[in-house]
Image: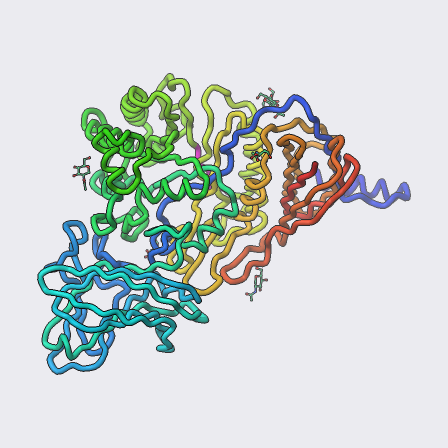
Amino acid sequence: MKILNKWLISLALIASGLSPLVSSATLTVSKTNGNASSPLLYGIMFEDINHSGDGGFHGQLLQNNGFQGTDPGLTAYAAVGKVTISQDKSNPVSSTITSSLKVAVPSGTTGMVGFSSAGYDGVPVLAQEYVSYFYVKGLYSGTMEVQLVGSSSGKVYASKSVTISSITSAFTYITVNLQSEASPDGNNQFQILFDASKVHGSSLSFGLPQLFPPTYHGRYNRLRDDAARFLAEIEPSFLRFPGGNNLEGASPADRWKWNNTIGPVANRPGRQGDWTYPNTDALGLDEYLQWCEDMGMTPVLAVWSGLTLGGGGIVTGNALEPYVEEVLNELEYVLGSTNTKYGALRAKNGYPNPWPVQHIEVGNEDNLGGGCGSYAARFTKIYDAVHAQYPKLTVIASTTSKSCLPATLPEGVWTDIHHYLKPDSFVSLFNEWDNWSRTHPIFVGEYASTHSNTGAKTHYTNMQGSCGEAVYMIGLERNSDIVKMASYAPLMEHFNMDDWSPNLMGLDSTPGSLTGSTSYYVQKMFSTNRGTTVLPVNSDNKFGPLYWVASNNGSTYYVKLANYGGSSESVTVKIADTTSGQLQMLSGGEETSNLPNNVSITTQTSSISGHGSFNFDVPAWGVAVLAVS
Ligand SMILES: *[C@@H]1O[C@H](CO)[C@@H](O)[C@H](O)[C@H]1NC(C)=O
Ligand SMILES: *[C@@H]1O[C@H](CO)[C@@H](O)[C@H](O)[C@H]1NC(C)=O
Ligand SMILES: *[C@@H]1O[C@H](CO)[C@@H](O)[C@H](O)[C@H]1NC(C)=O
Ligand SMILES: *[C@@H]1O[C@H](CO)[C@@H](O)[C@H](O)[C@H]1NC(C)=O
Ligand SMILES: *[C@@H]1O[C@H](CO)[C@@H](O)[C@H](O)[C@H]1NC(C)=O
Ligand SMILES: CC(=O)N[C@H]1CO[C@H](CO)[C@@H](O)[C@@H]1O
């Protein structure tokens, strides 16, 4: 109907001798009567899915280093030379890392032998310094070679000799720094080699081998610097962690357990995560909180609410009480003074200061998985215990569904909603919050366009999907007096080890593999151009296909626009007393995606000037941000 009208108007214009206008909008931004916007609005959600943690953001590059999860086998390991490797349960590294890798050397063997690790589908080998840690047990006196090697080419990119005197009665801990040359691809492996003639007829056991590239803020056991920096460009305001489904576990015993993710990595048992692969938990509670500190994010800590996945059941009633206690212990660890039992443990682990946690979320998607009926009671039990001790904490319920929530939700409680939808559905939710009750703030804890409008599964999101999300985000920002936080999900994938798509960004072992999806650029544009007040906009047009929101911070004004339509829109933005600034534009074909090693759509920035009036086109499926003062 709309298209027909435009066509008739064009015909009328042609008939009257004027040139046809495709479409145009004049937006006049008011400088008064705005609403305060949420300073936390744009943030990120993280759980280990698609190897976003182990093999993704977490720097440690060797898969299966602690033989964790239900059935690790020899995944990623291979023998180098005429040796036999096996999982060695008789030589545990610790009471929690219960296996090491035995390298048995037949009698008479000579030359350099050992084992390799193929990492997470290869090891990224760049011209940079790496650090490796490992344990070794068994009689050995001499040098070992720690190397990064091309798996097919055999080319050695890094090699470091270390002198080792190890014994049979205990593990010896080794730290090695090695400088590498760059490999042209990701098809690389890590190796530890030793002199077979010194061990022949016997064996050595290697425990918990670790390999780190440079880490974010140079910290021990932390994020990959390149991936973390790329993420930091979004300037996210909060981090929701540790899940997501990965919080829940297949059964109560398999849930994410905070106290298994702290202290020395060799004391963390890891677990079979909810996304088909083992989690090392090397990225644990303190690492998440340090990540928040280093990236300037507000932590949003999710705690287990009794709901499990995969038929493991739901813990309710009195049976939930030990888990409520566990939540209180976790909060004491995070927030308690060093005079408390768990606060002292935190200090012992290297963090004397309490972490600045002010938001906790009770569970994940308790409206799903059969959780709705019991959630009100489970939520109330946890809320009451937490609120009694920490009255200032903001507690977030994991659903907005009234039927799953207590009849009277306590004042100050926020609620979380998730949307995985077609682009058209995001557009139809543009006004989702316009008439929403203002009593309980909203957290859009997960959202992404996951299917095309025809229903086909999206693997790599495309401009139409990202534009649909942008329209939805404009609706969030317009209502950010009540919508306090929103996070796209999932955040990250290892391209060759994914189990959910699309994701905001991705990587693999090849150089330059870090890839931002078109949605990554939308998130970055919206997050890095924030006002403190959302301003009214007067327009001669209704919303659709063009959508907009205006805001300001002091004398800087921001107008975000999305053109969810197949033709270019001409826009005039009027803001009194402004003269110049920048126009950021993201556009490309409706079905064009950014692919691994083939990023074709990135934000283009240009200068713009005017006397209180700015004229520009927003291309079909384009997303734009005007920032002027
Ligand atoms: C973690 O806490 C639980 C109680 O919630 C306890 O049973 C378990 O032993 C603790 N684990 C560690 C490693 O301290
Ligand atoms: C919000 O309320 C207004 C005024 O009552 C109404 O016109 C509009 O359709 C409502 N919007 C939604 C999304 O319900
Ligand atoms: C401010 O909030 C009120 C109440 O929700 C709403 O009616 C009004 O449209 C909002 N103004 C702006 C500029 O968003
Ligand atoms: C608003 O501007 C002030 C001053 O430049 C700055 O410190 C603050 O971070 C800005 N706020 C936002 C939300 O960008
Ligand atoms: C890169 O992506 C674009 C857009 O999807 C596509 O047209 C082009 O063929 C791709 N190029 C390569 C080398 O794969
Ligand atoms: C490496 C890994 O865990 N891959 C898994 C990703 O998810 C798919 C689907 O769930 C599994 O089939 C893979 O094994």
| Residue 79 drawn above or below residue 311 | below
Task: Please tell me in which quadrant of the rendered image residue 309 appears.
Answer: top left
Residue 329 sits in which quadrant? top left
Q: Position of residue 186 (x, y in %)?
A: 41, 67
Residue plotted at (21% across, 25% down): 317
- Residue 306 showing in the rendered view: no
Residue 554 coordinates in the image, percent (x, y): 64, 30
- 153, above or below 33, in the image: below
Quadrant of the displayed image that contains ligand 3: top right
Highlighted range, magenta? 417-421
Q: Quadrant of the N terminus?
A: top right
Q: Is residue 21 left or right of residue 266?
A: right
Residue at x-position 31% and y-position 70%: 160
Q: Answer with left or right where residue 228 lies relative to residue 16.
A: left
* Quadrant including the C terminus: top right
The vertical placement of 114 against 550, above or below, is below
Task: Say which of 112 and 621 sits in front.
Answer: 112
Q: Is residue 475 left or right of residue 328?
A: right
Pinpoint residue 145: horizontal percent, then vertical percent: 27, 72
Q: Nearer the viewer, residue 582 or 180?
A: 180
